[in-house]
Amino acid sequence: MAIFEKTSHTKALIDDTEILNCTIENSQTVRKHTEYTLRVYRGILKDTSWTVSRRYKDFVDLHAALAPSGYELPLPPKKFFGNLDPSFIAERQIALQNYLNEILRHDELALSRQVRSFLDPHNYSANTAELALQTVSIALRGEGRFELKGAIADIGWRLRKHNFLVTDTKTQENCMLSWQNFGPDRYLNDKKLQAALKSLQNLVHPHIDPILAFQNLDTGVYVVRSIYEGGSLRDMIYHTEYSGNYLAKYSNPKNISPFVEEQIYDYGRQILEALKFLHEKGLPHGHIHPGNIMVVQHHVYLTDIENILLGGPHLYRQYLLQLRPNYSADNVDAYCFGRVLYEMTFGRPLPHCYCDTYPDYLSEEIKSVLRIILSRESCRSMPASLTDLLMLPTFNKRPVRHKDERATLKFPLALKEELRAAVDHIEDKLKKDQKKMRSAKREVRIQEILNSEDEMKKQKRKVKRRESQWQSMSSIPDMYISASVSDASSPTPPTTGAICARSPDSPSTYDPRRSLLDAICNFDKSRLAARHNAEHR
């Protein structure tokens, strides 16, 4: 089975950020090659699983597809002779398991289309890009304003988002069209979603990227925006082009440049102003990260504000699930803002949910801000809010850029109620998932304790069994010693040498091994036979 085989397209509303775990269960030889059966688990509780059959060639194809990432992955080498030997197959199975474990350890690889289609070909068809191109081509044919130029492939992490280069026939400017399928958290119906997107198209804010055009279709929405040649915040940090391959740009970057603190404070103030404005209008961003923050001459623009309406998964989902279930939509955006600050400060994403320690070379000001948002204590007891952050002197003393520009976003009254219900739905779902995560962790800890207790019980049983066996062996000599003493007056001479004889008058301490040896040496089979005949007369 080839890694990039075509499968039927399914409208599966699954969370693409859910963790996948994989175990190679067994292997079998089929037509002079070996197939490995992979058991794949989805989710925190691993309550959904399936099997996939893969050959070594499929692993080689996957390895080639992941090569742009720059990671040194431990794929076992190819063997031409003896590759059907059972011992070699067993060794290779272990090596391939280590290979998969290493892949899933890296977030960029675990979320990639290549890995997902390898482990879950049913939900991640290899021809999704072709289907997206077909859908967009038909939609633009009826729209008439934009001319499709071609695909801009794999520039982002979202598996169900496809980007295309289009030309505005009115202005002859090149724009970016982003087609995205609906996600599992979509709440609004088609009519309400159309009205909400129309309001977003009329949004005006100095730090929010405007939507030039959109179209709501059966399976998703496309949105047209201007192209930012300088790329995103993350492109600035890693010195990459906006149109570059996502894995090649961000997986294992070699050239990174963290921002100086003045840049961090300046960009941070602009981001907070935009987020605060959206929350005041009843629409959280919900998906903020350095990849959807654009910068033009130190002027920040937030993009992807429609993602929360489309119900797509969150890039930081695995970290949000580890937080306590007391986070509102405002707290979530503040937490994600903290992760953005961390990446601007260090030039790399925060690899954990919390961060309590920072290097000495950082100023106390930036360390204080990061601790307020990302420390374990803050996240557990008092999550930061956007208002709290804007009141900090670090951001409050910064001048507000373009403060004279007006900012407007109007939703119809009925739509406001729907948006409030949608936000409540998203918050409730996050809290339920957080509780599931805590429950799963608790079960793992309990199982570890039980396993340790079971192991202790096993060891105790082994000790008792050994003690019982020792006591049993110790009682054997006593029995034979008493028998030999009772027969000491018998005229039958001993049949063994002097070394086996034991004088009843000689003082001696009790020695189990010596007693057993004496009993064996003094044993007389003729007396045993005579006793047996007497009992059966």
Image (tube, rainbow, N blue to C red):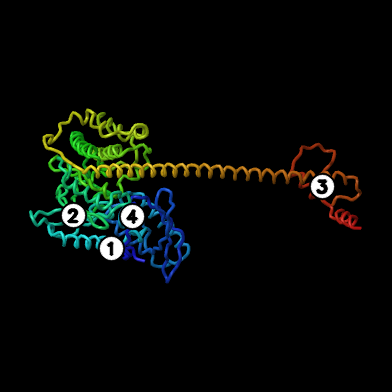
In contact (CB < 8 Å): disc 1 and disc 3: no
Q: Label 1: state its secondary structure.
A: loop
Q: Which mark is residue 498?
A: 3
In contact (CB < 8 Å): disc 2 and disc 4: no
Residue 510 horizontal/vertical position (percent): 76, 39
In contact (CB < 8 Å): disc 1 and disc 4: no
Determine the CA span between mark 1 and mark 2: 19 Å
- The numbered mark, 1 or 2, whose residue comes first in the sequence reads 1
Task: Specify the amino acid type for callout 4.
Answer: Leu
- Quadrant placement of the C terminus: bottom right
Q: Which mark is residue 177?
A: 2
Determine the CA span between mark 4 and mark 3: 91 Å
Determine the CA span between mark 1 and mark 3: 93 Å
Q: Which mark is residue 381?
A: none
Residue 38 horizontal/vertical position (percent): 42, 59
Q: Label 3: state its secondary structure.
A: loop
Q: Which residue is mark 1?
A: 127
- The numbered mark, 2 or 3, whose residue comes first in the sequence reads 2
Q: Nearer the viewer, residue 497 or 218?
A: 218
- The numbered mark, 1 or 4, whose residue comes first in the sequence reads 4
Determine the CA span between mark 2 and mark 3: 106 Å
